[in-house]
Amino acid sequence: MFLKKFETLMHYSLPTIINYHYLAYPLMPAEPLISSLPPKIPRLQVIALMKIVDSYTTLKTSDIEIIEKKLGITLPKDYRKFLLQNNGGKPIPDAVKLEGEYFDYVACFYGIRSSNYSDDLFRNVREYDGYIPPHYLPIGESPGGDIYCLSLIAEELGAVYYWDHELANYEGDPWEENMIKLAPALTEFLAGLYHEQNT
């Protein structure tokens, strides 16, 4: 098992371990390794390990409070932390797996900019109103126009879902048939991103 190669690294920092992982196994997601780490290492630290390029103006806690007020919701804790560290942008690595198989890519996460920009969070919330069920928050998109969302239902608050635009109901109320659950939380979703080998 490839994780055994990292047993001697457990006394190092989490960033060091993950960097070693990607150098040795660039096509494997880091989630299995992270799951094997001692409980004393906070799993939310994985957010800091994601490389986000083309991010925008850094947000403050007061900005997050304004965002929540405008949206009329309380953001999941790990998404709040993510926005404070990365105001939108493109993740590296960017490939998504579902049930162990390649699924799609993340083109970008939405940020707080201006409605003039296609990757502005508020703009996309408005544009997908009536297409995505109201108990999901759009937070990013795939290159093909499918949307990554966070569940706002209390029982699974923060779970990451994928809105498949080809299976959406454009002739009536939005439905659940095209919503695909990818991860129980944003932290796990980010940890599962990997480098897909081009063929």
Image (tube, rainbow, N blue to C red):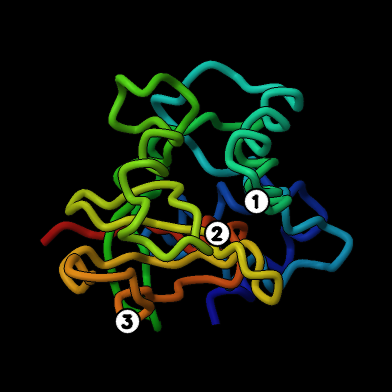
x and y percentages locating residue 97 in the rendered image: 37, 70
Under tag 3, what secondary structure?
A: loop
How dense is the environment of label 2, judged by Cα within 10 Å: few (below 14), some, or many (20 and up)? many
Type of residue at label 2? Ala
Q: Dots 2 and 3: beta carbons under 8 Å?
A: no
Q: Residue at x 71, y 49 (%)?
A: 74
The residue under label 2 is: 191
Type of residue at label 3? Glu
Nearest the eye: 153 or 191: 153
The residue under label 1 is: 46
Type of residue at label 1? Val
Left or right, residue 131 beside residue 87: left
Nearest the eye: 170 or 18: 170
Q: Residue at x 21, y 52 (%)?
A: 145
Q: Residue at x 74, y 63 (%)?
A: 8
Q: On screen, 109 above or below 184?
A: above
Q: Dots 1 and 2: beta carbons under 8 Å?
A: yes
Query: What whole-number distance in Å separates the C-alpha atoms at marks 1 and 3?
Result: 31 Å
Q: Residue at x 64, y 44 (%)?
A: 72
Left or right, residue 117 beside residue 148: left
